[in-house]
Every structure is written in C-alpha cells, then in structure tokens.
Image: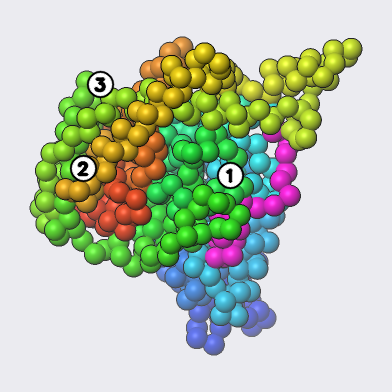
Amino acid sequence: MDAIGRLLDLRELTVIVDEQGNVTFSDLPADIREVARSISGVAMNDILTMGAGQLRDAVRNRELSPVEVTTAFLERVEAVEPQVHAFLHVDPELAFDQARKTEADVMAGRGGVLAGVPVAVKDIFDTRDMPTTAGSRVLEGFRPPFDATVVARLRKAGAIVLGKTNMDEFAMGSTGEHSAYGPTRNPWDTTMSPGGSSSGSAAALAALQAPLALGTDTGGSIRQPAALCGVVGMKPTYGRVSRYGLIAFASSLDQAGPMARRVEDAALLLQVIAGRDPLDSTSLDVPVPDYASQVNAGVSGLRVGLVRDFVEQDGVEPDIRKRVLETADVLKEKGALVRDVRLPHAGYCIAAYYIIATAEASSNLARYDGVRYGLRREVPQGGLDAMYRATRSEGFGGEVKRRVILGTFVLSEGYSEAYYQRATRARTLIRRDFERVFRDVDVLLMPTSPVAAVGIGERAADPLSEYLLDEFTVCLNLAGLPGISVPVGLDHAGHPVGVQIAGPPLSEVDLFRAAKAVEDEFSFYTEFPDL
C-alpha cells in the first residue's frame, strides 16, 4: 500500500486530525510524515527555512508538531554535521522528550513563547542533562548539577534544546579554531573560519541546523561570527541577560545574547532570556520591553552616527567599506538622519581589552586546578604542585595558556600600574566617548569585522592578527553597550558581510528597529549556503 493509502487507513485507527481539522504528525513513519506535511502545506525544506516565530505559530495552530519540527532539524544536523562540526553534543532522545512534553502543553493550551522551537546552545552554558565543556579538555565530561538561567528560561518557554555547540576554548578566540575538539567550519565555505568564539552557534544557524542559538560576547564573540556566517547576532547591554551558569572568561565583559537568521527571531529570543535574575547580582532590575512587537516600527527620525574613522581605517576590506556605506544610504532612504561621528579614543580599545580581559581570565581560570571538578592528572611522587602543573598543562590549550600567562603578568607586582591600571583608565575614556556621542545620535553604524573571511589556520602563527579581527567590537564590551550585527549580502568571493549597529545602554529596541530596516532591504535570510 502506498503512503497515501496507509495515511487514509491510519485515519481510521489513529487521531491525526483534530476537531478543527488540524493535522498532527507525532510518531508517524517517515513516508507517512511526508504525506502529512503535504496536507498541511509544510515541506521539509520549509520547516528548516522557517523563522522561529513562524515555527512557533505553526506549532500553536497545530499545523506542525514539536516532534515533527525536532525531527526535521535533527535530520539536518546529522546530514551536514560532518562538514561543519557545529556541535559538540547532540542528544536526540532528550530533544524528543522535550518535544513530546511541549506538544502536550500545546494541546492543553499552555504553549510558551518558543513552544516547539529548536535552539542550539553554546557549550559555555551549564546544562543539567548534557555535558558542559567550554570547548576545553579541562572540563571534558563535566555535567553541571543545574541549568544556567538562560537555559532554564528557554525550557520554560517551550524551546527544544537540540545540543551544545562548538566554541573557542573558554571563549578565547576569534576563529573557532581553538576548540579542544576540533575547529568549526564556515558553511558558506568550509575552508574558511566561521569566526569565534560562538563559532558553532553561528555555523549551526547558517547551515540550517537550528532556527535559534545562544552565544556569548566578551569582545565580539556573538557579533563577529554572526557577520562571517551571514546571520544576526546581538550583544545586549551588560546586565540585560543573566550570567548565572555562564562559565566565566572575563566577568566585567561577558554577556549572553541571541543569535538567529532573522532580526525578529533574535528579538523573540532576547525577550525570553532577558530580565532580572536574583542569582546574578550584576543583572539589571529594569522591565523587559516587548522587543518582537517593536522591530517593525521603522527608522523615521532615528539619528544614526556613521563611525567614519572605522569605515575608512586601513585593513578594512573594500567590500566591507562599500556595504557599510550602502547601509547608511538605505537608512537615509527610510527616513533616518545620518551624520558622521568620531570616537577619539577608539584606537586604545584593542590594547585595553586584551589587558583587562586576560587579567580577569587569569583570575577566573585559577579554579581549574584538578581538585574540585574536571580533569585531574596525578604525578606519582610529585606532590600537589606537580598535580596542578600537569592538570593545567594538559587541560588548557595554547591560546588559553597564552592569555592566562599574559593576564598574570599584567596583574603582577610592579606591572599592575603600568598595564592593568592604565587599561582601566583607558576604558573610562572610551566609555565617555560613547556617552558624548550619544548626546547627538541614537545609534552608531560601523563594520562588524574588518574582513569577510579568514582561512582555517591562516592566522594561527600570528595571534595579534587574529586579535585585530575584533577591533570594531571590543569597544562595546568595554563600555557595556549593546550592539547587533546584521548581514547585508556577500562579498566578491561569495562570503557573507555583516554591519554593526550600536547604541547606548538599554537601547535594544532601537537596534532591532534599525537592523530590521536593513534586513528588509537586503533580505539575506532568504539565501543559504550550498551544503
């Protein structure tokens, strides 16, 4: 009997059409699922390319089952993961358990804001039911006893956690090559880096392995890989999202944020994860706006500052410069007021960042000593000090060691004033530059990255050249400001280009409005890599 006949036969035996005529697909064989999809008008490729909001609405309207959506994305992960290596851990059984629970909630009228929407979670967030390694051997096999606050909020909203994504070890890197478990590759060109450190999250979105992803941004680790992979990534205001359960790199700079293929979906995800958390004393106790409902408000009258010094800086590729200026013209045409602005102390951002970030990393990573959790290397007859040395030598990769050593040096007696204290004073000057410029404009427009693509291994021998990939993103972290990267097309070689829009504290609504106006013009979310 063909699939249609079997489907008709099953309708006699199984309730797959409810009283309103909605088809549900749970637990049906694969060929029957395809027929059921055609009845609902939703094909497999449609599921993969639908936005998170569209998927949520289809689940709520019972046009799609959470199980069906989860199946589609897990099949996609399995199909392209060997080429991309976006995930470190995928648990289909756990994902299906979540999907079935969400389906029951939807049937009972309790569907959450992200009911049935799969999410990829960067492996720096604690998850009680999956390993959390931060991309490091020193945490290999570690299973936290609790969920990070953002993960708990995702689950409460009905999202389906597909798995944990690859990343530069402890978020220290800009290319995705510093993972202890092998590099992630850019879906648009697998010889290229996807950026970092949220490499797996960005690549998973570009490869259609998930419609939403969580990342973290210490110096550009959401925005930069978003630009290189052609997706949307936002670093919220420092404190807007809880850091509880986020494995620390640099505590005064780290911030969790949303990644998606569409601006509206990033707004929807931020809506879920933002807000005060009593478990994080740095989280802000201010109301969370309805971001998703305001993304289409337009940019008429919005004052945009074009950071001309960044656009015309040496090292910015011509295609990047062209796209940023085109974006400025688009915003003008849509009613924004665009003017040039300057950030006088921006030239100190990279130096100040790599002193402050490494100093905080040195302190935060001291806890990985082989005593309480994670890797432990015993040295026969060597004593405690030998165990410490062996554990940290084998557990940490080269980039982490480099930053810990540098951070320890700039905090050491006799050097703290010359380096760390000066860097903190430079940070104050940088913050004041932003405060001054935001008296005259509402948002800033600038490149996200100076380049559109970096070859795997291309900068391995020159760490400084890799650090300079973050020269347009680290300033926002130093000042605690929000920023969003939105894709605006491809360069001449077929690599995605992203532009960055930044704002004063808690200006995420304005950033989403501006980014949506740009997205509407370029519609890059309709383009996909050929995997």
Magenta segment range?
Answer: 139-159
- The image quadrant that residue 459 belongs to is top left
Disc 2 to disc 1, how far (Cα)? 32 Å
Camera-nearest label, 2 or 1: 2
The label number, if any, that marks residue 457 in the structure image = none
**Residue pictured at 38% horizontal, 18% vertical:** 465
The label number, if any, that marks residue 246 in the structure image = 1
Residue linked to disc 3: 315
Q: Is residue 157 magenta?
A: yes
Where residue 315 appears, as percent x and y from the top left, is 25, 21
**Residue pictured at 40% horizontal, 23% vertical:** 422
Numbered circles on residues, count:
3
- Above or below residue 203? Residue 267 is below
**Residue pictured at 55% horizontal, 16% vertical:** 413
As rendered, which of 384 and 76 lies closer to the eye?
Answer: 384
Q: Amino acid at mark 2?
A: Val
Residue linked to disc 2: 437
- Above or below residue 322? Residue 521 is below
